[in-house]
Image (cartoon, grey):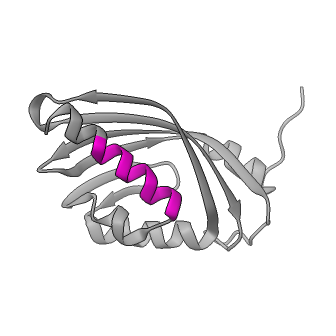
Amino acid sequence: MTSAEIRAFCERFAKAWERSDVAALSACYAEDCEVVSPIFHTLRGRAEVETSFRDLFQAFSDYSIRVNDMIIDSDGGGRAALVWMAQSTHRGPIFGMPASGRRIESQVAFIMTLKDGRIASERRIYDFTGRLIQMGVLKAKTA
């Protein structure tokens, strides 16, 4: 993929997240992809990724995303790193945690390897503990 194609892909990917569009997001992933995530651990294959998006968007709604950084490497099929600030509302249960109704904000980084125009591998990096504190599941430790 060219740098322009990777940039367009990343922009579509971010917009699909903001719409909570499971079908559009799932279509971004290769059939045999691997995704490593703090909340979902290791996902293998597009079907597992799709299920994770359904679970996530049932628990967190009204995503708002502000892309802070996009790094593109068009060598060898393509790689990209996206860093964005995401906001959403915890409106449904997830992993046994009931909805808190709280607005959650976190900075998220995606490091992606692309193959044939889809994500072959992805590593998501974010502060899961910070999200749990914002949801009210954990209490922040005071100094």
In the rendered view, would you say 63 is above or below 73?
below
Residue displayed at 71% across by 61% down? 89
Quarter that holds the N terminus:
top left
- The x, y position of residue 76, in whole percent, is 10, 32
Magenta segment boundaries in residue numbering: 8-19
Image-quadrant location for residue 123: top left
- The x, y position of residue 90, in whole percent, is 71, 64
Position of 100 compared to 14: left or right? right
Residue displayed at 68% across by 46% down? 105
Residue 40 visible: no
| Residue extending furthest toward the right | 143
Q: Is residue 21 found inside the magenta-colored segment of the image?
A: no
How many labels were placed on the picture?
Answer: 0
- The x, y position of residue 58, in whole percent, is 58, 74
In the rendered view, would you say 57 is above or below 65?
below
Residue 56 visible: yes
Residue displayed at 54% across by 66% down? 56
Position of 123 compared to 131: left or right? left
Position of 130 compared to 121: left or right? right
- The x, y position of residue 13, in whole percent, is 37, 52
Quarter that holds the C terminus:
top right
Residue displayed at 50% across by 63% down? 19
Q: Is most of the magenta stretch helix, strand or loop?
A: helix
In the rendered view, would you say 120 is above or below 51?
above
